[in-house]
Image (cartoon, rainbow, N blue to C red):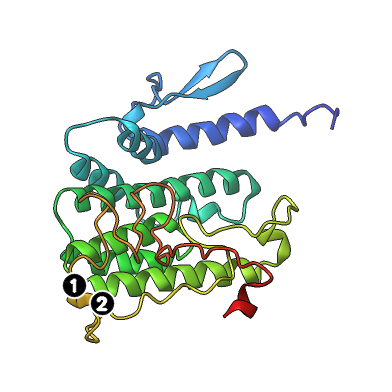
Amino acid sequence: MGRAAPPAAVAALQSYVSHLRRRLEPDRGARSRGSVIVSRGSGYAVLLEPEAVDAWRFERLLREPGPDPIARLGEALALWRGPAYAEYADLPWAEAEASRLNELREVARDQLAAARLAGGESAVLVPELETLVAAAPLREERWRLLVLALYRAHRQGDALAALRRARRMLADALRRRGPSARHPRGGPARPAVPGGDAVGDRAPDPGPASGRGGRAGDRRDAVPDPALGPRRPGVDAHPPGPGLLSVSPARRPTPAPRTPGSAARR
C-alpha cells in the first residue's frame, strides 16, 4: 500500500479492458466507441440497461404492482438458473449479495403460492407446498399456506396433522438452539410459537371430531377457514398473517375458588 504502480500496470489494465469490451460487445467495430465500458476521467465505467441484468429484472418484477401477480411472479422466478452468484460463492464480496438475492427468491416463491391459493388453486397446490416446506421448514408462511390449501381441498384431518407437525418442528428447532434462542432477551417468560402456545408445550390433541369416534376430517368445520367467519371452540385458526395457524384447546370456565372449609362441608 502506498507504493507507486509498476510501469506496465496501465498498459496491462488497458489490455484487460480491451479484451472485456470484445466479450461484452462482439459486434462493435475495432475503432468505434464502446457503449458498455466507457472511459470516465482516469478510469472506466460500465453502463448497462436495466433489462440487461437478470438480477435487476427479477427485483423489478418482484416489487412492481400489477393486475396479474401470478404471471408477474412466475416470470420473475423463471429468470433463475440456480443459486445467486454460485460461481463466486467462495468470494467474500459476493456472499452478502448472494444471500440477499436468494432470500428474495424464497419470498417470491411464497408470494406466488399465496397468489395461486387466492386464485382458487388448492388441491393441485398441496404437493408443491409440501416440497417448499421440506426445503425450508422454518419458514412459517409456508406452513400457513399448506394448512390453508389442505383445508380448502376438504382435507381437514390432514390440515390438523400439518399444524401439529409445524408446532412440533418449530419447538424442536428452538429447543436444539438452546436457551438463548428460546429466551432471546433473557426474560423469564417462555416465548410462544407465533399463533400458538409456549415453546416446549406439546400441541394439544383436539380428539375425535364427534362423540361417536369420527375422524377429524369427517367434519368440514374442524378447521375453520379464516376467511369464512367466526372461530369455533376447540380449534382456533388464526387469520392469515405473519403468524402460524395453530390448534388451541377450547376455553373452559374457571372454577370458583374454594374456601378452607368447603371440603369439610361436603
- The residue under the point 57% across, 46% down is 94
Q: Which residue sits at x=53%, y=49%? A: 99
Mark with earlier residue (1, 2): 2
Distance in Å between CA atoms under marks 1 and 2: 6 Å
User: Is residue 79 visible to us here?
Assistant: no
| Image disc number at residue 172 | none
Cβ atoms at labels 1 and 2 below 8 Å apart = yes
| Image quadrant in which you'd find residue 64 | top left
The residue at which mark 2 appears reads as 209
Q: Is residue 8 left or right of residue 105?
A: right
Quadrant in which residue 63 is drawn: top left
* Visible residue check, residue 233: yes
The quarter of the rendered structure image containing the N terminus is: top right
| Residue to which mark 1 is pinned | 219
Query: Residue 163: where, in percent of width, then height?
Result: 38, 68
Vertical comparison of 149 with 36: above or below: below
